[in-house]
Amino acid sequence: MRLIIKYSKHIPLISFALLLIVAIPFESGFTIQSLTGWNMVIPSTSYLEIIVLIIILIITFIYWKIANNKINLKLFTLHFILTIPIVLWARFNFPIRQFTTKNSTDIFEMIDSINRILYTVLILFLIGQAVFAYLLFKTRKKTKH
């Protein structure tokens, strides 16, 4: 228990560094899609993956900069938990969409399911960023005094 308390200031940095590793797109370049009568070149890394990677990189950098300050671990935990879904969605959105397609009987039902998942993930992410902003405000306020 004392070990956790002693190194608790590094928990946010380590947690987001691990989340950053999950967010890194491992495949890059272009995929050639050949369908009958159609030839397409599709980027294999989605723009969402790149945007989420940049956001997680910035958050990790901020936690690195404030690592010496005392951080409210409850607020950090809430921020971390609310950030995980956007990373998972960005990283694994193609398998999620394929699973949704296989389990849908109607195209409109499929689109509705994907939209519900996406909007839920985005709302959770925005709430998490509001918690992060509040956490930074509280941490900055403590360091000024």
Image (cartoon, rainbow, N blue to C red):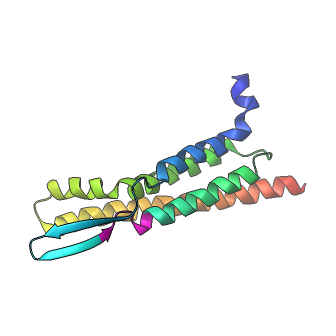
Q: Where does the image place residue 59, in percent across and percent down from the top left? A: 63, 57
Residue 45 is a magenta residue? yes
| Relative vertical location of residue 59 with respect to residue 3 in this rendering, above or below | below
Residue 128, image quadrant:
bottom right
| The magenta stretch spans residue 4 | no
Looking at the image, residue 101 lies above or below residue 21:
below
Q: Residue at x 69, y 51 (%)?
A: 63
Count of all numbered marks drawn on residues in the image: 0
Q: Nearer the viewer, residue 64 or 85?
A: 64
Q: In the drawing, does residue 12 fall left or right of residue 100?
A: right
Residue at 73%, 23% in the rendered image? 2
Q: Position of residue 16 (x, y in %)?
A: 59, 48
| Left or right placement of residue 62 versus residue 29 in this view | right
Q: Is residue 82 left or right of residue 76?
A: left
Q: Quadrant of residue 117?
A: bottom left
At x 21% / y 67%, what residue is drawn? 33
Q: Position of residue 92 (x, y in %)?
A: 35, 53
**Residue 125, image x, y percentages:** 50, 60
The residue lying toward the viewer, choosing from 9 and 73, is: 9
The outermost residue toward the top is 1
- The answer to whether residue 103 of the structure is visible from this angle is no
Quadrant location of the C terminus in the rendered image: bottom right
Q: Is residue 68 visible?
A: yes
Magenta residues, start to end: 42-48
The N terminus appears in which quarter of the rendering? Answer: top right
Residue furthest to the right: 145
